[in-house]
Image (tube, grey):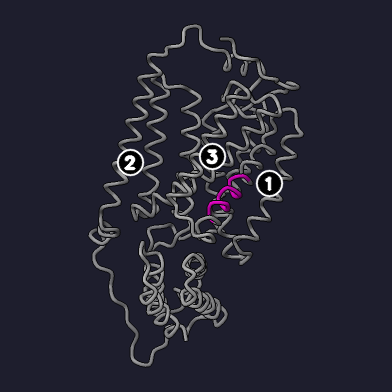
């Protein structure tokens, strides 16, 4: 049976870059910014999750219209679109998790089904999923829709992995990095190139997000302590420098001739080898699932405790205030968030309490460079009590009484 030839529309030069090492470097940089920049606007600036999502949806519409209006690949516009898609996809997943209380396993599954549907409709309509064929507007629309869903899926899957394993930011980088290496090996040995590309593309999302957490989280949480604002600036600067280089060197420009050669089928495609490597990729996936199941069954935090020894119990001297040396405005901000969280717990709004607890975590992490040098003992006491609040609220089976006790203890210390 002969498949009908899809309508191609008006042909353009390729609208995507050449898939080189530069492509993957800047893709990971964009992914990292998607995590840290969204947190900075939402938490640090206090804009709020829903408002931030609406803002970036509007920005995405404008940037995407700009990208679609072009007839060829322009590095600055293309990668600006990727950055905005990264932030927007992250925000959509955060809304489902933090605002609507959708479990990460559910959002991961839903986004995986949506991505499969996007690929299925794309293939049915265009008879190709290759990015070398992005030379018409319909194909480009499918391409950007798929990318948006991969960012949302990667965010949900990455966060779900962290919830399951309890890994720190440094360790959590290793799983997606290892899977990407396995996919590259499979591609080199004959796995389908299009499948390998999209698998690697999805996996760069949790890799970049974990790198962002590693850079931004405080040192006592195994991070580098740079904060989300500094992390965003560093990676945005790196993206800009890379885009400037690519704009001048044109090292990632895919000509029409090269795209045609890449799109053309091989003279004798080795279907047997592709089948074998598909089995290999399936085995890699099974090993990853086994690792996650094993890590989930381990007591979270035991490994870190065994390496660093038991955390010292920091206490205040009689009559000593934990907040006496801290600026009143910083203390008031933390106290307001804690009070709001307690109100949400009392109202039975666990999803709202979880979202507000993330505000608390972000505000406290951002304040660390200022507060800790002023009074290390007071900071340590509050840090331990905040950890207790976060642990109780994020428990798999949260108990309102335990949450309220932890919150009341913290409020007493803050007062």
396 or 36, which lies in front?
Answer: 396
Residue 265 on image: x %, y %: 54, 12
Indicate the position of residue 184 as horizontal and vertical percent values: 42, 28
Separation of marks 2 and 3 at Cα, in angstroms: 21 Å
Q: Name the residue under label 3.
A: 114
Counting residues from the start of the chain, the first of labels 2 and 3 encountered is: 3
Q: In which quarter of the image is residue 19?
A: top right
Report whether residue 108 is seen: yes
Nearest the viewer among 273 and 260 is 273
Badge nearest the viewer, 2 or 3:
3
Number of callouts: 3
Query: Is residue 182 rendered magenta in the image?
Result: no
Extreme residue in the top direction: 267
Q: What stretch is highlighted in magenta?
A: 85-94
The residue that disc 1 covers is 60
From the image, tell me which residue sits under label 2. 289
| Residue appearing at x 55%, y 29% in the figure | 120
Instruction: Kindly identify the residue that appears in the image at 35 percent across and 19 percent down.
Output: 276
Q: Local crowd at mark 3 within 10 Å, few (<14), some, or many (≥20)?
A: some
Residue at coordinates 24% horizontally, 64% vertically from top-left?
309
What is the C-alpha distance between the residues marked 1 and 2? 34 Å
When asked about the image quadrant of residue 95, the answer is bottom right
Choose between 182 and 249: the one closer to the eye: 182
Secondary element under disc 1, as helix, strand or loop, is helix
Residue 57 placement (x, y as % from top left) = 67, 50
């Amino acid at each position: 049976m002969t498949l009908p030839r899809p309508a191609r529309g008006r042909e353009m030069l390729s609208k995507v870059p050449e898939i080189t090492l530069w492509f993957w470097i800047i893709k990971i940089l964009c992914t990292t910014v998607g995590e840290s920049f969204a947190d900075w606007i939402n938490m640090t600036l206090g804009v709020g999750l829903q408002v931030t999502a609406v803002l970036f949806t509007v920005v995405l519409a404008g940037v995407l219209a700009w990208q679609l209006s072009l007839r060829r690949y322009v590095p600055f516009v293309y990668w600006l679109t990727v950055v905005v898609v990264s932030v927007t996809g992250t925000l959509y997943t955060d809304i489902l998790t933090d605002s609507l209380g959708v479990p990460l396993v559910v959002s991961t599954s839903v986004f995986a089904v949506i991505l499969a549907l996007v690929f299925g409709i794309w293939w049915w309509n265009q008879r190709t999923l290759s990015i070398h064929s992005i030379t018409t507007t319909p194909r480009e629309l499918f391409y950007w829709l798929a990318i948006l869903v991969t960012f949302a899926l990667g965010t949900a899957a990455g966060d779900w992995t962290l919830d399951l394993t309890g890994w720190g930011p440094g360790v959590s980088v290793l799983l997606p990095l290892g899977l990407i290496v396995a996919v590259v090996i499979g591609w080199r040995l004959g796995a389908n190139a299009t499948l390998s590309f999209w698998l690697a593309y999805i996996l760069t999302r949790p890799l970049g997000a974990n790198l962002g957490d590693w850079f931004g989280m405080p040192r006592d949480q195994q991070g580098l302590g740079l904060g989300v604002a500094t992390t965003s600036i560093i990676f945005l600067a790196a993206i800009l420098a890379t885009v400037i280089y690519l704009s001048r060197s044109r090292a990632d420009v895919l000509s029409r001739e090269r795209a045609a050669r890449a799109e053309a089928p091989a003279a004798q495609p080795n279907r047997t080898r592709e089948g074998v490597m598909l089995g290999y990729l399936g085995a890699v996936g099974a090993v990853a699932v086994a690792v996650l199941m094993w890590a989930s069954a381990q007591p979270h935090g035991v490994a870190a405790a065994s390496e660093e020894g038991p955390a010292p119990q920091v206490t205040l001297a009689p009559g000593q205030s934990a907040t006496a040396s801290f600026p009143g405005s910083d203390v008031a901000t933390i106290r307001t968030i804690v009070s709001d969280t307690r109100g949400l717990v009392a109202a039975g709004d666990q999803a709202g309490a979880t979202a507000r607890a993330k505000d608390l975590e972000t505000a406290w992490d951002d304040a660390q460079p200022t507060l800790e040098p002023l009074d290390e003992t007071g900071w340590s006491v509050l840090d331990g009590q905040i950890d207790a609040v976060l642990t109780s609220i994020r428990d798999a089976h949260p108990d309102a009484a335990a949450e309220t006790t932890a919150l009341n203890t913290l409020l007493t210390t803050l007062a």
